[in-house]
C-alpha cells in the first residue's frame, strides 16, 4: 500500500497514540465490548470521542466542526469522524454495568502503570447535576447549584483523588431515593480494585444518611463530613 498524505488541523493529537498503546487502552476497549457497528467499531467510536476531548471540547455536539477533516478521522481509524448525532446518542447504547466495568479496568491499569497519580490520602465525593432542557423531559428534578434552583436533569456522582484530582469513580442517572446509597456503592467498587480503603472519604453532610455513616464506621472506613 502506497503512503498517502493528509492534512490535519491539529496534528498534536497523534502524539497520544504511543501513550494509548503503552497503557493498553485499545485492548481494554475491546475487552469491555463497548458498543460498535459494522461501519464504526467500538475502538473507533471511543477514539472519536477522545479526539474531541483532546482538541479541548467538552461537548460532543461540536463534532460537526471537525467531521469533514480526514486527518482527524485517521486518528480514530476512520476516513472521517462520525456525525454529532451518532456521538451524542452513543451513551444510549451502553449499560451501567458496561461503563462501570470499563472505568474499573482503566483505573486498575492506571494504578499499576502510574501509581504516582493516585497518592492522595483523601477521596472527595460529590453529586453533580446536568440540567436537561427538553420540553418533554421525564427526568426527575435535581438541585443545580450553578443555577440555584431545581431543574429536570441527570444526577451524577464523582469520586476524586484529592492529590492530583484524578477521577476514581463516576455514575450517572441516580434517582433521588437512591442518593444516600452512593457512598456504599463507591466503597464496594473501590474495594474490588484495592481490597482495602485506607483513604479518608470527604463529602457533604447531606451526602448520605446517619445509618450509612454508622455502617461505614463499623466497616472501619474513615470519613469526614462537611457542613
Image (cartoon, helix red, strand yellow):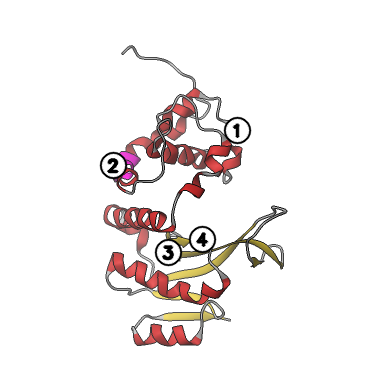
Disc 1 or disc 4, which is closer to the eye? 4
Image position of 204 (left or right of 116): right
Give the x, y percent position of residue 145.
66, 66
The reply to whether dot 4 and dot 2 touch (C-beta < 8 Å) is no
Query: Marks 1 and 4, Cα distance to the nearest angstrom?
Result: 26 Å
* Residue 206 image-quadrant placement: bottom right
- Sequence-first tag of 4 and 2: 2
Q: Which mark is residue 172?
A: 4
Sooner in the amino-acid sequence: mark 2 or mark 1: 2
Q: Residue at x 53, y 69 (%)?
A: 126
| Distance between mark 2 and mark 1 Cα atoms | 30 Å
User: Magenta stretch: dominant SS?
Assistant: helix
**Against 85, is 91 above or below?**
below
Q: Gap in Å between the C-alphas at discs 3 and 2?
A: 24 Å
Q: Badge 1 local density, few (<14 within 10 Å), some, or many (20+)?
A: few
User: Is residue 59 rendered to the left or right of residue 183?
Assistant: right
Q: Earlier in the sequence, mark 1 or mark 4?
A: 1
User: For the N terminus, which image quadrant?
Assistant: top left
For marks 3 and 2 on the same chain, the one whose residue lies earlier in the sequence: 2
Q: Earlier in the sequence, mark 3 or mark 1?
A: 1
Q: Which residue is mark 1?
A: 64
Q: Secondary structure at mark 4?
A: loop
Residue interval drawn in magenta:
19-27
Residue 134 image offset from top left, x and y in percent: 69, 52
**N-terminal label among 3 and 4:** 3
Residue 120 place in picture, x, y as percent: 39, 67
Residue for point 63% across, 65% down: 140
Q: Is residue 139 visible?
A: yes
Residue holding disc 2: 22
Amino acid at each position: 500500500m502506497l503512503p498517502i498524505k493528509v492534512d490535519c488541523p491539529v496534528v498534536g493529537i497523534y502524539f497520544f497514540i504511543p501513550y494509548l498503546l503503552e497503557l493498553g487502552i485499545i485492548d481494554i476497549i475491546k475487552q469491555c465490548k463497548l458498543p460498535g457497528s459494522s461501519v464504526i467499531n467500538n475502538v473507533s467510536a471511543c477514539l472519536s470521542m477522545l479526539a474531541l476531548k483532546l482538541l479541548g471540547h467538552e461537548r460532543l455536539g461540536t463534532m460537526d466542526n471537525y467531521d469533514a477533516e480526514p486527518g482527524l478521522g485517521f486518528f480514530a481509524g476512520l476516513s472521517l469522524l462520525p456525525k454529532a448525532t451518532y456521538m451524542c446518542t452513543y451513551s444510549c447504547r451502553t449499560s451501567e454495568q458496561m461503563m462501570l466495568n470499563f472505568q474499573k479496568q482503566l483505573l486498575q491499569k492506571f494504578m499499576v502503570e502510574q501509581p504516582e497519580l493516585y497518592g492522595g490520602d483523601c477521596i472527595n465525593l460529590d453529586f453533580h447535576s446536568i440540567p436537561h432542557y427538553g420540553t418533554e423531559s421525564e427526568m426527575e428534578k435535581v438541585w443545580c447549584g450553578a443555577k440555584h434552583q431545581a431543574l429536570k436533569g441527570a444526577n451524577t456522582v464523582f469520586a476524586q483523588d484529592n492529590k492530583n484530582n484524578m477521577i476514581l469513580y463516576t455514575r450517572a442517572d441516580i434517582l433521588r431515593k437512591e442518593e444516600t446509597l452512593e457512598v456504599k456503592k463507591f466503597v464496594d467498587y473501590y474495594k474490588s480494585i484495592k481490597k482495602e480503603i485506607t483513604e479518608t472519604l470527604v463529602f457533604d453532610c447531606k451526602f448520605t444518611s446517619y445509618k450509612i455513616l454508622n455502617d461505614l464506621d463499623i466497616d472501619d472506613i474513615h470519613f469526614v463530613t462537611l457542613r
